[in-house]
Image (tube, rainbow, N blue to C red):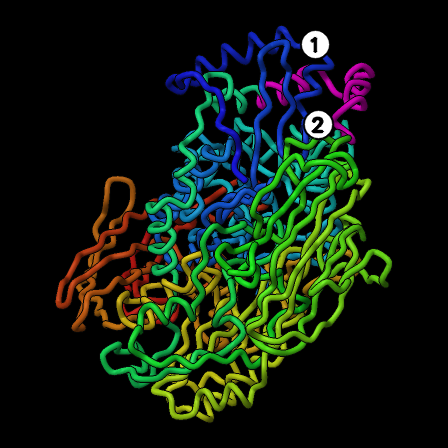
Amino acid sequence: MMPAAAQTVAATAAPSEQEIAARVKSLLGELTLEEKVSLLAGGSRIATAAVPRLGIPAVRMADGPNGIRANETYKATSFPASSAMAATWNPAMASRVGEAIGEEARALDYSIVQGPGLNIQRVPVGGRNFEYYSEDPYLSGRMAVGWVKGLQSTGVMATAKHLAVNNQETDRQTVNVIVSQRALREVYLPGFEAVVKETDPGLMMAAYNKVNGFYSTENKWLLRDVLKGDWHYPGVVISDWGATHSTAPAINAGLDFEMPAPAKFFGKDMVAAVRRGDVSLATLDDSVSRMLRLIIRSGRMDGWTLRPQDKVDSVEHRATSLAAAEQAITLLKNDGHALPLDPAKIRRIAVIGPNADARMIQGGGSSEVTAIRVTTPLEGLRAALPKARIDHAIGVTNDRFAAMADPRMFSTTADRHEQGLTQKLWTSGSMDGAPVRTMTDDVFMRFYFGPELSEDAGNKVVMQWTGYFWPPTTGDYDFSMIDRGNTSVWVDGKPVIAPSQPNSPSPLFGGFGWRERRTSVHLEAGRAYPFRMDFMPARHWNLAYRLGIQQPVGSIAQAVEAAKGADAAIVFVGSSVTSESEEADRPNLKLYGEQDKLVEAVAAANQRTIVVLNTGGPVEMPWKDKVSAIVEGWFLGGEVGNAEANVLTGRTNPSGKLPVTFPRRIEDNPTFATFPGKNLEAHYSEDLLVGYRWYDDKAIEPLFPFGHGLSYTSFAYGGMKLVKADKGWRVSFTVRNTGKVAGAEIAQLYLAFPQAAGEPQRQLKRFERVELKPRQTQRISFDLTDADLRIWDTAANDWKVENGTYKAFVGGSSRVLPLSVQWTR
């Protein structure tokens, strides 16, 4: 369902900061105390409050950052997740994606997008790492700056999040992070600082966790001293949903805006706090002024115009999603030129694994986009290899609990002409009378049904879905319903899920009060089973449900049979939405379930076994030396199948590089001894040695190092020069494509500091993507200034630059750096 076309007037040019300031001052003088306070909390779960008397509108917001995730479950283009975007090492591509998301936000009537996520991937098992860019602050900052510039070029405001050190899901709402000022300034905050100073994001989201003893939403040092003081941030500091814990302590520390509605602390308690003098009028007016500036910047007061709805999932946006996905794919290993597959020579391949034909496009949680279009790897390979025989087997599951129902298994009629189910909706509390809405629906998880349903009407919502279920294979199907106990399911006229049956705690979003009910049913492939689902009033303002269906996966033995005799066996393994998700960190770095056994068995049956991983971060690979090629396919969005097929068949030359280190074993990572903390305290004892810095300092050989990524061609570095520049030093060098096909290389510069600085061995300071034809050479120049040499002096509470010898290293990864040059400052 799409938003109704809005009645708009012609948009005017964006006002200048001087004009905005004058309008803010004028409005501030007209607002009553109660109206001022009303602007400091949500008007709903997804919007600011309005003041109709003064023409101040509500401003709507949607989740991001890999596409529009709307409470109304509008469909949108699904783009690669942030860790995948970082693997492109291409801020210009991030900008293209950000701009496309901004256009879709405007088409769906949103003025704010919750993104980008800027937390450092400190913990390799972090359940939400896929929403964050990298373990490195410089790479994170450059990618985020590109994304925000693209998004905000459309007039949609970004929300940089989650300030600060929200690096784990375990105890995320209560954990107290103990971290040094130096590590904060040099590792965990630079990405946020870059976004603030270079893009002026509309909002900055304060995290759930505590930082050195204070909740992020009550942390004066973080919000008022650093963000609003040192960085001069003029925007709005918004709480994460439910992260506000107080009234006067929070606003006095620098929090401006409490979410979601209804206000718990920034409502009548704020009015009382101002009248008591606990909150000064100046502090209140500062927060209100920031909110007014945001609303004016959004354009909602000056003729906000919707983009055409055909912008959503447009040809251009699909092309952007595909290009980003292709650039993200990272070739980790390619022995004996196992890749690319030659379409002219391939006669039969085996496509194996739980992600081969799954819609595995993203991680789980609040960023899940309801994608309009998804191509699976199996579908992509069938299109890319039309003459080849393709044998498909699943073999094992990678789901922690039942996967969300696949819309391809449903049709509205027995002729299977239309995918999905017929949905009818009533707002009277029963199914009596004509429904107020009838539509085709293929979305099987919703948090909230939309703004057209008021809170009172929402409590009386009744919905019914009817159609047919088509099992793709014969076997036992596990049906799961996660809701508040008010949904029933029938298959073939028989009750499968009923409110009266026993339930268990929900494996996700338990804070919503959800429970799970499950039933197993034996079904036969090729039959059309009549299907019905009824949603009755939940008597709760948060209307939500999730239908899961776990299909039969066969056996490893069946996968081995498919692999035998094939020209190549491609095994698609990795995470699912249920095994890598918000709210839960991964228990270890192993592939979930029996996926490692599957890879080992297939590799034993076929010498040309290629493993394609779909993960948000690193995994252990005990089978690494037994397979011919390994491809990291990340969470690539809706074009995952086409992108992976293009790379596997050589239509696209892979150019992705790892934005995180892949350790050989979990025990090698810098947080192994301290994660997730004890007694709700997480001590960041590794200090500056985050990610590759730890492995370098401790001389630990990783499985695959930070910055690593192979190509179907080869590159050579040379001609390094150092010259004094106006404000520092210029390092230049050449990169040559020494192979036979065109390709792209990511040239990386790492800096070593004087020993007296007490810094890690090397730090990434510059990078550039360069596309080269065979035998083509290009010279690349990087300028370095004192800003790149600064380190935090805790005693002086300021930045400083050490005198001494600096050394720049250049190459294709953090561990392959053939060029170096040094100078003395």
Residue on which the image places disc 2: 252
- Give the residue displayed 41% in from the left and 72% down from the top: 631
Is any part of residue 126 visible from this angle? no
Foreground: disc 2 or disc 1: 1
Quadrant showing the N terminus: top right
Please report whichever mark, 2 or 1, sits nearer to the chain's N-terminal start.
1
Residue 264 drawn in magenta:
yes
Q: Position of residue 178 (x, y in %)?
A: 69, 53
**Three-letter amino acid code at the position of disc 2:** Asn
Q: Secondary structure at mark 2?
A: helix
548 vs 590: above or below: above
Magenta-drawn segment:
263-291
Label 1 crowd (10 A; few <14 / some 14-19 / many >=20)? few
Q: Position of residue 795 (x, y in %)?
A: 59, 44
Residue 389's label in the rendered image is none
Most distant residue in the left direction: 775
- Give the residue displayed 63% in from the left and 37% down from the top: 437
Residue on which the image places disc 1: 32
Our reading of the magenta stretch's main secondary structure is: helix
- Give the residue displayed 68% in from the left and 55% down from the top: 546
Q: Nearer the viewer, residue 113 or 162?
A: 113
Q: CA distance from mark 2 to mark 1?
A: 20 Å
595 vs 447: above or below: below
602 vs 660: above or below: below
Which quadrant of the view contains residue 429?
top right
Residue 747 drawn in magenta:
no
Q: Are marks 2 and 1 in contact (CB under 8 Å)?
A: no
Is any part of residue 394 visible from this angle? yes
**Three-letter amino acid code at the position of disc 1:** Thr
Q: Position of residue 657 (x, y in %)?
A: 38, 64
The answer to whether 723 appears left or right of 462 in the picture is: left
